[in-house]
Image (spheres, grey):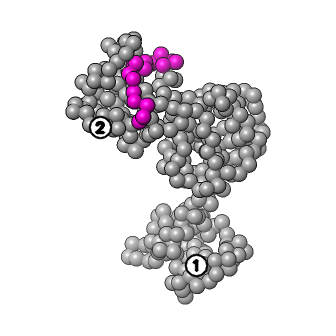
Amino acid sequence: MVTTQLATDPGVLFNRLLARGRLRHLQLIAALADVGSVQRAATAVGMSQPGATQALADLEGLLEAPLFERHNRGVRPTRFGEAVVPVARNVLQALRATTETLSALQAGAQAFLRLGCIPAAASGLLAKALPALLQAQPGLQVELIEENMVHLLPELAAGRLDAVVCRRPQDVPAAWQFELLQSDAPAVVAAPGHPLAGLRSVALNRLVGLPWVLPPRGMGVRDYYDRLWAGHAQQPVLYPMATTALPVVLEALRSTGAVSLMPQSIAQALVDTGVAVVLAVKLPQALESSLQGLGLLTTGFADGPALAALRTRLRAASGT
């Protein structure tokens, strides 16, 4: 019977897993956590139910801890299982990412680069750097994921991304490296033809009566907005939807006469394509610390050839 306390030295457990652990063990415990049933998990991974039961018992024996407990509707992770399941998922996802890289290389790509980025980086830095990079290196294949930092940081930590183009995170491992490439600032954006467009100067109080389309709370530009209007007797009316989806924002600006606050790195791309204008609002620079610049975040290992080439293109695009 499996013990309920980990009394074995961590190094011993690690060596046991290396010597006797199997990838099928990881696949099974991830499936068990997903479906909560030995029978359904066995079917999902292509095992018989007795085989799955034995495989789970083998893994629990290696770790000297029960990973799942039975209840009247199936199984659920124990506190030991809750520690192991996320690791199993990370390993499986990293393996999947590796197989995707190998598949791309087998299909003729000379290199494969997996990047994450926040929306501000996609609109500015990467929109300039990636086409130039791919033109210069036709054998390179890039997979680009646009997400928020809550999603991107775990992906980078697990090795499923090679780098992230983002703002400097507050808390990252000491070995990670962030290279600042481009400063940024907030801008007030409106649709072309807005009554305030084209004016040489727009006072902030002229925007009080207009609806503002803003991103969700927790983003730098939203924090800047809160600081900008703090202490004002009159507050603008917020558009009844918080979003970073640019098509939705642009339609709201066009159809309602609203304004939006967004990073200059995004606003400039909209201005360049003629779908928005930046109003000549003088914004306080003292508040801009809430909207940091953009840069390249890596885990601190030496750049491979593809990542080194990207870094060079990003520096060129940013003028650094």
Give the image quarter of residue 244: top left
Residue 154 inside the magenta-drawn segment:
no
* Sequence-first tag of 2 and 1: 1
Residue 40, above or below 148: below
- Which of label 2 and label 1 is nearer to you? 2
Q: Is residue 314 visible?
A: yes
The residue lying furthest to the left in this view is: 233
* Residue at x-position 63% and y-position 52%: 176
Q: Secondary structure at mark 2?
A: loop
Residue at image mark 2: 230
Percent coordinates x, y for residue 88 in the rendering = 58, 64
84 up-or-down from 146: above or below: below
Query: Which numbered disc covers residue 60?
Result: 1
Q: Is residue 48 left or right of residue 108?
A: left
| Residue 277 inside the magenta-drawn segment | yes
Where is residue 237 drawn, in percent x and y?
25, 31
Q: Nearer the viewer, residue 312 or 243?
A: 312
- Neighbour class for label 1 at 10 Å: few (<14), some, many (≥20)? many
Q: Quadrant of residue 122?
A: top right
Q: Tell me residue 37's x, y (percent).
A: 47, 69
Q: Residue at x 49, y 69 (%)?
A: 82
Residue lying at 42% horizontally and 34% vertically, measured from the top left: 286
Q: Amino acid at mark 2?
A: Ala
Q: Position of residue 14 (x, y in %)?
A: 67, 74
SS of the residue at dot 1?
A: helix
Magenta stretch, residue numbers: 271-287
The amino acid type found where label 1 is placed reads: Glu
Q: Looking at the image, which is closer to me, 256 or 263?
A: 263
Q: Disc 2 to disc 1, how far (Cα)?
A: 56 Å
